[in-house]
Image (cartoon, rainbow, N blue to C red):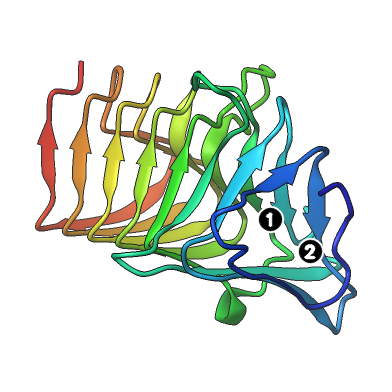
Amino acid sequence: YSTNINKDVKWGNTGGLPYIILEGIQVYKSPTETATLTIEAGVEVRFNQGNGIDIGTSNGSSKGALYAQGTEEKPIIFTSNQETHTSGYWKGLRFYSGTETSKTILEHCIVEYGGSRDWSYLESNVLVNKATLTVKDSKIRKSGICGIRVLGGDLEIENSEVTGNSVDGIYSDVSAKLNITGCDFSGNDPYAIHISGTTDINITGTTVSGNT
């Protein structure tokens, strides 16, 4: 798959066959209309090296959404297109200020092996850049840099695991808001949650262990 998305598109379950992302994909339509990429439960999305999915435009001029709602039995998997997976192989999922919040969610998702080292401030499995994102019942793991990077955005993460990321589990700076509930942070190096700058943070019922 290598086509930018400027209308509503659904990636359905293909009976176990993965979607292969050959080039980076951008999802957005216009300032007044939203292009939504909906991914069904049980779908696996594999990324070639250095590619990812960008939601909305960075200046907020055009709207996009990613609706990825799996189930406990059939999670949605975002991973590298490799036989032997390596951290930092693909860019990650990037949510910009053009993200349409009401149509966007990551629920029962596994996001792994992203955060490619392009030496920018965007390196992470999941980037929240002046956007608002909800993550529920998901696993964010084995990023080449950060599990989740919050840059002037709002993140609500519930009942999720953020584990084994090469730098921080969550790294937040500039003006951001974090609500973290019932999560597990382990095996991140060096920090589970790294706050730099002004961040409004609320943490409840969360376990932090084994971060070095």
- The residue that mark 2 highlights is 60
Is 84 situated above or below 44? above
Name the image quarter holding the C terminus. top left
Q: Quadrant of residue 62?
A: bottom right
For the residues labelled 2 and 1, the Cα–Cα distance comes to 7 Å
Count neighbours of disc 2 (C-alpha within 10 A) and say few if under 14, some if 14 to 19, many if 20 or more. some
Total residue callouts? 2
Q: Secondary structure at mark 2?
A: loop
Q: Which residue is mark 1?
A: 96
Mark 2 in CB contact with mark 1 (< 8 angstroms):
yes
N-term mark: 2 or 1: 2
| Residue 41 image point, x, y percent | 48, 68
Going 38% across and 43% down the picture, which residue do you hit? Answer: 140
- Residue 160 falls left or right of residue 84: left
Closest to the observer, 142 or 33: 142
Q: Position of residue 161 (x, y in %)?
A: 26, 46
Amino acid type, residue under disc 1 in the picture: Tyr
Q: Amino acid at mark 2?
A: Gly
- In the shown orientation, is residue 187 left or right of residue 55? left
Quadrant of res 65: bottom right
